């Protein structure tokens, strides 16, 4: 009897391990700036899993009237694709395909997010199942970034009305070019935690971090992920083309946090240089 119990317990542990190892978030692939009709068609026809797109308040090219949420990256304010059409096109595609594409909506201003509420609402209902991420830089970050963040309290309050959505909230950054050093500070992490608590966030959260900076910030990022484990938190490591990245340190960060908690959205050459180990070689 005891033998049986031990065997069962062992089997359960092994099954759990297998499940964890199989969960490798770095296998998720990305299309970026899917901000016009032609590129949306192309991205939907490709085998990427997530479509990242930017939303501003603006106009459909050639049309007047009050500004609406459209797919464009600042400073552009016009597009041939509205947020509404973007989402309905993705939904249509997903209805017809067994492998669903997810969307990461990067809101560039609180005004765009506010106006987007009724447009997003039908897609954050439980019967819709494709991944829906709501992203914004809500806090000022390294290195002394001066870009104006999206209002943190307003963003979190509105986003929490879409409990199915993954909240992707991070810091503005000033990095790249001749800026090759920087780190996320204890204060950056503390402010993020405070904002999540104050706004009673209770849904899945991912924290986007810029690769070159994140690789210098392992201790504080581990703290942040530990403190947000109750939100099933993960990090999403991203990088701009040409950012200086200490590859060995980034690799150490990814393996310490774990590939089951790390999305990786970096240029292909950087991803290749990381030489992430296959399942059998990962040690904790
Ligand atoms: C970094 O580059 C910017 C713009 O390219 C330039 O204005 C600045 O002087 C440079 N700073 C240093 C320390 O080289
Ligand atoms: C968090 O949300 C879940 C449902 O998604 C609910 O059961 C739980 O009570 C909530 N927790 C808090 C602290 O609000
Ligand atoms: C975390 O994941 C568990 C298991 O899937 C789920 O029951 C819970 O609601 C999730 N909590 C949050 C805040 O996402
Ligand atoms: C995780 O996925 C990456 C990218 O596909 C791959 O290079 C790596 O070997 C995988 N590792 C594990 C542990 O599954």
Image (cartoon, rainbow, N blue to C red):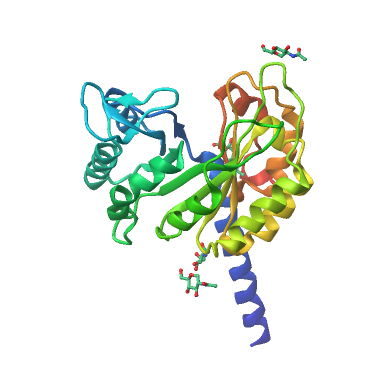
Q: Nearer the viewer, residue 40 or 251?
A: 40
Report the residue at 32% width, 49% height from top: 120
Residue visible at 55% across and 46% down? 169
Give the quarter the ligand 1 occupies.
top right
Q: Report x, y in % for residue 164.
A: 41, 58
> Is 135 positioned to the left or the right of 179 in the image?
left
Q: Left or right: 9 with respect to 56?
A: right
Front residue (pair 244, 137): 137
Viewer-closest of 139 and 24 = 139
| Image vertical order of residue 128 relative to residue 210, above or below | below
Tell me the quarter of the picture where residue 180 sits.
top right
Q: Is residue 121 visible?
A: yes
Relative height, residue 17 to residue 113 (above, below): below
Q: Position of residue 109 (x, y in %)?
A: 46, 38
Q: What residue sits 59% from the left and 55% below the top?
A: 233
Hey, which residue is sitting farthest bottom in the picture?
Answer: 1
Residue 76: which quarter of the image? top left
Q: How many marks?
A: 0
Q: Position of residue 10 (x, y in %)?
A: 65, 71
């Amino acid at each position: 009897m005891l033998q049986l119990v031990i065997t069962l317990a062992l089997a359960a542990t092994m099954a759990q391990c297998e499940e964890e190892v199989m969960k490798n978030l770095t296998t998720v692939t990305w299309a970026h700036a899917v901000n016009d009709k032609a590129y949306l068609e192309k991205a939907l026809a490709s085998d990427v899993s997530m479509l990242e797109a930017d939303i501003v308040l603006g106009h459909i090219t050639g049309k007047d009237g009050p500004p609406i949420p459209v797919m464009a990256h600042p400073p552009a304010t016009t597009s041939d694709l509205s947020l509404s059409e973007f989402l309905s096109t993705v939904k249509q595609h997903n209805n017809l395909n067994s492998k669903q594409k997810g969307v990461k909506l990067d809101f560039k201003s609180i005004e765009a997010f506010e106006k987007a509420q009724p447009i997003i609402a039908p897609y954050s209902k439980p019967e819709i199942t494709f991944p829906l991420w709501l992203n914004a830089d809500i806090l000022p970050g390294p290195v002394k970034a001066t870009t104006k963040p999206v209002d943190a309290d307003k963003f979190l309050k509105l986003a929490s009305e879409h409990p199915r959505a993954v909240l992707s909230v991070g810091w503005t950054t000033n990095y790249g070019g001749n800026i090759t050093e920087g780190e996320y500070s204890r204060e950056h992490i503390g402010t993020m935690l405070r904002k999540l608590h104050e706004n009673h966030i209770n849904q899945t959260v991912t924290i986007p971090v810029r690769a070159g900076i994140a690789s210098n910030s392992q201790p504080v990022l581990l703290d942040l992920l530990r403190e947000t484990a109750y939100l099933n938190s993960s990090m999403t490591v991203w990088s701009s083309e040409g950012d200086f990245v200490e590859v060995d340190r980034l690799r150490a960060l990814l393996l310490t946090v774990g590939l089951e908690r790390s999305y990786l959205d970096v240029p292909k050459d950087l991803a290749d240089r990381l030489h992430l180990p296959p399942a059998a070689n990962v040690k904790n």
